[in-house]
Each structure stands twice: as structure tokens, then as C-alpha cells.
Image: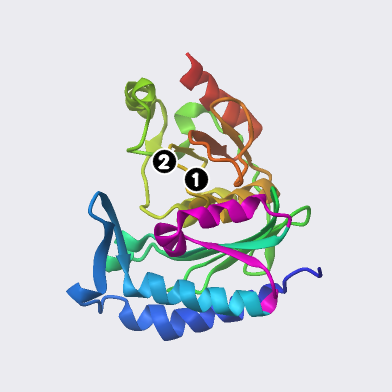
């Protein structure tokens, strides 16, 4: 397979944004919004569903016979996650990362797309509909923002580091630990949109994210961006992130040095 053309992906994401997302931005009716299920507080809108359906159609045309894992598809059919263990190309899509922000009319939301084959993440893309900012990465070829290659060179102390710590889904043994280490950093603040956080890490505007629950559509695209820009990731059990293995508790950082310093805090 030849590489997927970045300009083609950008065109698809731009058209979907202009035709589906932007017309509904700050223009949602109450009937357009619902919770995914009775026990879940996660919001979903008609826009999330429409974008995912359109992306599945467009991406499968780019790569016939490819598999597809989308956040909204998974909510209805959890077994699609097994696609990652097939020896086939597979798209992963978060149609709107930051749905709550989108519903509230806030600016931080994005589309996340990644292409994998088995356990390898081959390419990934993050698109911001309001600013047209387009970030992408290719395995072994680096990370780019609007066609300009970017690399991370920040090696900061804990006391100077800015980032985020998940606020829920922690196992009981980590709840108090996260509350304590939070105050050791310069700033801990979540955007409510992990796509923005990943992009800010490769820009050098943020330094880390400490994550609990790991749904692949939230992280697979950003992980490749950070790795290709020179950053690092590690689970609390000292293994690297793999989208085809169901595992939580992850540190993503601008360097191995900062990653290890954070890991030491958690292990203390």
C-alpha cells in the first residue's frame, strides 16, 4: 500500500467540517443531543454520528477493504474493537473529540483519524474545524503541523511542567496519589479535548498528560504525533502504549526524561 495522501485527508476533513460540523456549531437543538446510554454521562450529538458515517464512507473509498473503528460505532457494537487484531488496514476515528465543548459552544474540539495495521500505527491526523489547523504524522517520518515538520525539545523539571491529569476512572489505589502529585507541577489543567492537548505537546505549549481510561479513538492519533515529534509514552507497568491491547493508566510526555520523573512520583 502507498501512503495515504495527507492533502486528500485534509480535503475530506475540511469538507466534512464545513458541511456538517460548522453549520451546527452553536446551533444545536435539544433534540440533537443525548447521552449514549442510561448509565453513561458521555454526550453524543447528531453531528458526531453524521461525521463518523461520512468518514467511514470516504476513508473506505481511499482504502478499499479496510476495517473501521469509530467511537460511535463502538458504542453500538463493541466487538468491532477486535479489528485491531486482524492483519488488515484499519481506520480509527473520533468524529468530534471534545463533544461537550462542542455542545457548549466552546472552541476546543477536533476530528481525530488514524490508520493502523495490526499493532502498528502507520499514519495519523488531527484537524481543528474552526482554525483549519492540520496536524499529521507518519511512522518513521516525523510529525507536522500545517506542512511544517515539528519536534519537541523541552526537557523540563516537574515544577516547571504544564499538562493534565485525568479526573476520573482511576483505580482506588491511584485516586489519592493523583490528588497529591497534582500540586507538584507548575499547572495541571484539562482542555476537555485530548486532541488539543496532544497537539500542544508537539508544539511545546504543554509537557505531559497522565491518563486513566484509554479508548483508542481518543489516543491512537495523538500517540503517533507525540512519538514522531520526539516525545514518549509509558503505562504504569512500564510498557508502551498499544492500541490493540486493552490497558489503562498512561503517561505521555515531551521526553523520556520527564516521563521517567513523573513515573517516579507515581511509584513513590
For residue 104, say whether it is visible. no
Secondary element at image label 2: strand
Label at residue 206 = 1
Magenta-tinted stretch = 62-87
Q: Which residue is mark 2?
A: 164
- State the separation of the CA atoms marked 1 and 2: 9 Å
* Badge 1 vs badge 2, beta-carbon distance below 8 Å: yes
Q: Where in the figure is residue 48, as x and y percent of width and height?
A: 39, 70
Q: Where in the figure is residue 65, as x and y percent of width and height?
A: 69, 72
Quadrant of the rendering where the N terminus is positioned:
bottom right
Magenta stretch contains residue 116? no
Q: How many marks?
A: 2
For residue 74, say whether it is visible. yes
Q: Where in the figure is residue 157, as x and y percent of width and height?
A: 53, 28
Single out the residue that lies furthest toward the right: 2
Name the residue: 72% across, 60% down: 88
The front one of 258 and 119 is 119
The front one of 268 and 205 is 268
Q: Is residue 56 above or below residue 183?
A: below
Amino acid at each position: 500500500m502507498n501512503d495515504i495522501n495527507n492533502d486528500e485527508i485534509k480535503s475530506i476533513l475540511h469538507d466534512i467540517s464545513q458541511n456538517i460540523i460548522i453549520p451546527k456549531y452553536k446551533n444545536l437543538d435539544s433534540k440533537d443531543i443525548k447521552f449514549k446510554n442510561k448509565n453513561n454521562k458521555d454526550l453524543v450529538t447528531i453531528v458526531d454520528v453524521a461525521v463518523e458515517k461520512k468518514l467511514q464512507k470516504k476513508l473506505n473509498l481511499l482504502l478499499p477493504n479496510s476495517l473501521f473503528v469509530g467511537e460511535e460505532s463502538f458504542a453500538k457494537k463493541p466487538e468491532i474493537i477486535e479489528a485491531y487484531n486482524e492483519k488488515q488496514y484499519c481506520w480509527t476515528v473520533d468524529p468530534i473529540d471534545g463533544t461537550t465543548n462542542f455542545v457548549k459552544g466552546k472552541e476546543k474540539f477536533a476530528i481525530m483519524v488514524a490508520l493502523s495495521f495490526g499493532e502498528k500505527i502507520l499514519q495519523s491526523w488531527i484537524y481543528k474545524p474552526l482554525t483549519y489547523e492540520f496536524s499529521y504524522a507518519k511512522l518513521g517520518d516525523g510529525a507536522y503541523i500545517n506542512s511544517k515538520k515539528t519536534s519537541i525539545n523541552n526537557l523540563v523539571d516537574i515544577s516547571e511542567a504544564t499538562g493534565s491529569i485525568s479526573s476520573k476512572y482511576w483505580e482506588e489505589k491511584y485516586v489519592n496519589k493523583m490528588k497529591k502529585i497534582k500540586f507538584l507541577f507548575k499547572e495541571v489543567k484539562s482542555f476537555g479535548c485530548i486532541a488539543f492537548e496532544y497537539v500542544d505537546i508537539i508544539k511545546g505549549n504543554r509537557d505531559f498528560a497522565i491518563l486513566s481510561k484509554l479508548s483508542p479513538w481518543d489516543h491512537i492519533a495523538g500517540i503517533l504525533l507525540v512519538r514522531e515529534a520526539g516525545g514518549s509514552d509509558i503505562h504504569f507497568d512500564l510498557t508502551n502504549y498499544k492500541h490493540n491491547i486493552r490497558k489503562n493508566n498512561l503517561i505521555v510526555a515531551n521526553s523520556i526524561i520527564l516521563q521517567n520523573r513523573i513515573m517516579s512520583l507515581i511509584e513513590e
